[in-house]
Amino acid sequence: MKRKILNLLESTTSFISGEEISNSLGVSRAAIWKHINSLKLEGYNIEGVSKRGYRLITSPENINLLQIKEMLKTKLIGNNIVFLNETESTNIVARDLAVNPDADGTLVVARTQKSGKGRLNRPWHSPLGGIWLSILLKPNLEPIYASKITLLTAAALSKALILNDFHVKIKWPNDIILNNKKVSGVLTEMSCEMDKINYIVVGVGINVNLEEKDIPEALGNKATSLLLEGGKSINENKILCDFLYYFEKFYFELLETFEISSSIEICRELSWIIGKEISINGASGKEQAIALDITPLGQLVIRTTEGKVKTILSGDVTLTESY
Ligand code: BT5
């Protein structure tokens, strides 16, 4: 019976009255109430409003603070968690927390973002069903290390997704690609002085349980989700905690050695662009090139159409043939 009630709730985003459930399943209102309470204990977030009925808001697979706290295996990242149903952008929330002296490692997670952002202020679509998070860091490092944090984040995302059987690729420097479509992106923002980082905010978006209807048409053939590629819904809390585990591991490696060797190895091994013709929009404008390698410092090595070999610190890459 519990499953039947759940089927009804899952069939709509609106309220279903107790009477409707009772009539269609032939059970008493008291029995419905009992089953709804038991579903809530299993992690289903069900809203009950008198005279309107019940409405399913989220399933246990969706982000929820309780499960994150249970599964998190990190030492620093997520010691403080700010959990929000909705916000403009988790990166903005994290940035505003940076004045707090104990904020190092704070994790901000939101179920939805109204103005999620990508690099260069491009919009980031953030409906329910994704992981939208920001990590606030206050490392004792020089600003030059900030771009390494983007790469180690991409490496950690890949490790976590591969652990969960999604064979992703990395599009240097900040995209995670699954079956030739973008499934995740990283936005690293920083406040610094000449020789000192004040704080870094690492923003990560992962399309986990987004359905086709959740992806705007304009992104249709460029974006995908774990649900769409794997054919079943995935526990968002597990993906988030697996990611944070690897993120912390690679971040500590940077703090201890000032290098990100393990992450670079992963970025090279899983590169979606090495050996391919690309178009790169970087500091020196747009160029056609072949991506050759990623250096130990995390720069992209390219050979331009004029045959010049160069290293690029950051830029926007597209594959010339398809992407
Ligand atoms: C990124 O930028 O890929 C960085 C995305 C970071 C998002 C996270 S969510 C939590 C945190 N809070 C924020 O406000 N942001 C971070 P970029 O490489 O510039 O890619 C942006 C482009 O990706 C857009 O112009 C769209 O074409 C595309 N896009 C937008 N939403 C998408 C989505 N959900 N999935 C895949 N592609 C998307």
Image (cartoon, helix red, strand yellow):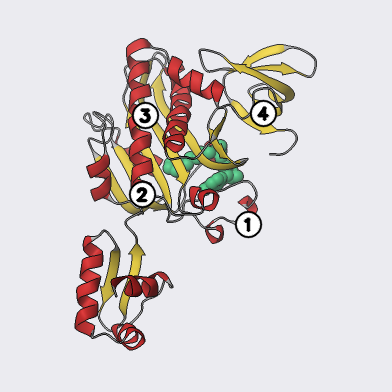
Give residue 281's mark: 4
First in sequence, mark 4 or 1: give its number: 1
Q: Helix, strand, or loop for circle 3?
A: helix
- Residue 170: where, in percent of width, then height? 55, 31
First in sequence, mark 3 or 4: give its number: 3
- Residue 202: where, in percent of width, then height? 41, 33
- Residue 310: where, in percent of width, then height? 67, 13
Measure the alpha-carbon separation of dots 3 and 1: 33 Å
Q: For the point 21% across and 69% down, which residue is it? A: 37
Identify the amino acid type marked 2: Ala
Residue 129, quarter of the rendered image: bottom left
In the image, residue 274 sits, relative to residue 34, either above or below, namely above
Measure the alpha-carbon separation of dots 3 and 4: 30 Å
Identify the amino acid type marked 4: Asn
Q: For the point 29% across and 62% down, which residue is it? A: 44
Measure the alpha-carbon separation of dots 4 and 1: 25 Å
